Image (cartoon, rainbow, N blue to C red):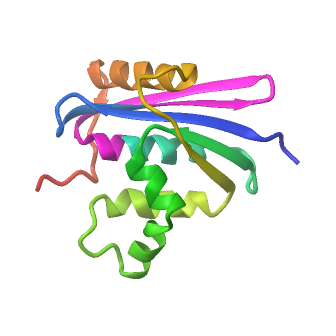
């Protein structure tokens, strides 16, 4: 059985919408992995959710025990208060980011994930690292297209 995994995530948009990025730190025993990517046009909530998706998708073993720390009430509350499962039953009608929520649910169901909300820009060292990664990614010259983003 693989060791428990701790994940920290953050997303940021420079303007909302605007250029954005995500950052994630994955820790398992002595191992540490940092992920980040920037996008030309996106929103903060999309980057928060994409950070979670990207981090969970990097896990090597199904059935991993994961504690995921995020400063996004949007993401944490949607899962912990089980809203996302109701949205799914209704086909995400009227909800933003259905592409990412579907992507999230697919990978979420492969693991045992517990979400913990942390205050952003506070004293959580790894969350602050994720913020640094996200802002750097959003500010980089290597920005991808967020193909799921649709202007309202």
Residue 130 vs residue 4: left or right?
left
Image height of 111 relative to 32, above or below = below
- Which residue is painted at 29% across and 29% down in the image? 143
Q: Quadrant of residue 146?
A: top left
Considering depth in this image, is 122 or 142 the residue closer to the camera? 122
Considering depth in this image, is 115 or 105 the residue closer to the camera? 115
Residue 96 vs residue 100: left or right?
left
Q: Quadrant of residue 55?
A: top right
- Which residue is painted at 28% across and 32% down in the image? 20
Q: Which residue, as the protein is rendered here, is positioned at the far right?
A: 1
Residue 16 vs residue 75: left or right?
left
Residue 95 on image: x %, y %: 28, 66
Considering depth in this image, is 131 or 147 the residue closer to the camera? 131
Magenta segment range?
23-47
Residue 84 on image: x %, y %: 44, 67
Residue 72 on image: x %, y %: 41, 43
State which quarter of the image contains the C terminus.
bottom left
Image height of 119 relative to 55, above or below = above
Most frequent secondary structure within the magenta stretch: strand
Q: What is the total number of numbered labels drawn onto the structure image?
A: 0
Image height of 103 relative to 34, above or below = below
Residue 45 on image: x %, y %: 32, 46
Q: Is residue 43 magenta?
A: yes
Image height of 87 relative to 146, above or below = below
Q: Which residue, as the protein is rendered here, is positioned at the far bottom?
A: 90
- Which residue is painted at 66% across and 60% down in the image? 110
Residue 90 vs residue 85: left or right?
left
Q: Is residue 122 magenta?
A: no
Considering depth in this image, is 136 or 94 the residue closer to the camera? 94
- Which residue is painted at 50% across and 19% down in the image? 129
């Amino acid at each position: 059985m693989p060791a428990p995994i701790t994940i920290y995530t953050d997303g940021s948009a420079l303007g909302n919408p605007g250029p954005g990025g995500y950052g994630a730190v994955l820790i398992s025993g002595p191992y540490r992995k940092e992920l980040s990517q920037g996008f030309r046009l996106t929103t903060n909530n999309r980057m928060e959710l994409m950070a979670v998706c990207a981090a969970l998708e990097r896990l090597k073993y199904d059935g991993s025990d994961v504690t995921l720390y995020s400063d996004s009430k949007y993401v944490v509350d949607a899962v912990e208060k089980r809203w996302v499962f109701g949205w799914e039953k209704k086909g995400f009608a009227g909800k933003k980011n259905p592409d990412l929520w579907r992507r999230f649910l697919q990978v979420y169901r492969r693991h045992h994930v517990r979400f913990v909300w942390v205050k952003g820009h506070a004293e959580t060292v790894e969350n602050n690292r994720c913020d640094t990664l996200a802002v750097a990614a959003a500010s980089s010259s290597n920005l991808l297209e967020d193909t799921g983003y649709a202007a309202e």
